[in-house]
Amino acid sequence: MTTMDLFGPKPRRPPQKLMHVADVYCDMCSEEVQVVKFVCSRCDYATDWVEISTVTEAKRGIPCPVCTAKNVNNEETQCQIDTI
């Protein structure tokens, strides 16, 4: 038996479309900063060289500005339709 939530479903952010590592430059003298290029697999948007502090942060990816903007615009229009 499932219980009903008294306040309705929790509002959630739309999932972010992430860009992943395409190329990395790692200087052996400076292990503090990695320089990375990111590419989006959905829209083929590519960044210039970006400084990232850790390898884990680079592997995690960064949000794609093109796909995220499309996603936000679609959600805003959906919210406007729902409120009318």
Image (cartoon, grey):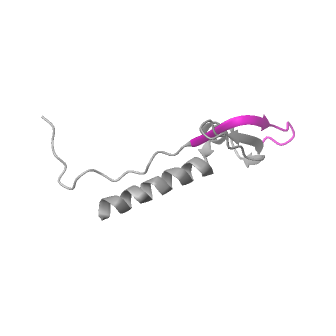
In this view, the residue farthest toward the left is 1
Q: Magenta segment: does it hold 25?
A: yes
Image spot of residue 31 (x, y percent): 79, 40
* Apparent side of residue 15 relative to residue 20 in the rendered image (left or right): left
Residue 19's place in the image compared with 74, above or below, is: above
Q: Nearer the viewer, residue 67 or 8?
A: 67
Q: Nearer the viewer, residue 54 or 7?
A: 7
Image spot of residue 44 (x, y percent): 67, 39
Q: Magenta segment: does it hold 21?
A: yes
Kindly indicate the quadrant of the structure image that contains residue 46. top right
* Apparent side of residue 72 relative to residue 64 in the rendered image (left or right): left
Q: Nearer the viewer, residue 19 or 6?
A: 19
* Apparent side of residue 26 relative to residue 72 in the rendered image (left or right): right
In this view, the residue farthest toward the right is 29
Q: Write the start and end of the magenta stretch as one range.
A: 18-31
Image spot of residue 52 (x, y percent): 71, 46
* Apparent side of residue 75 relative to residue 70 in the rendered image (left or right): left
Number of marks drawn:
0
Residue at horizontal 74 percent and vertical 41 percent from the top: 37
Residue at horizontal 38 percent and vertical 51 percent from the top: 12
Residue at horizontal 47 percent and vertical 45 percent from the top: 15
In this view, the residue farthest toward the bottom is 84
Residue at horizontal 75 percent and vertical 41 percent from the top: 36
Image spot of residue 41 (x, y percent): 62, 35
Kindly indicate the quadrant of the structure image that contains residue 55. top right
- Specify the quadrant that holds the N terminus: top left
- Specify the quadrant that holds the C terminus: bottom left
Q: Nearer the viewer, residue 56 or 66?
A: 66
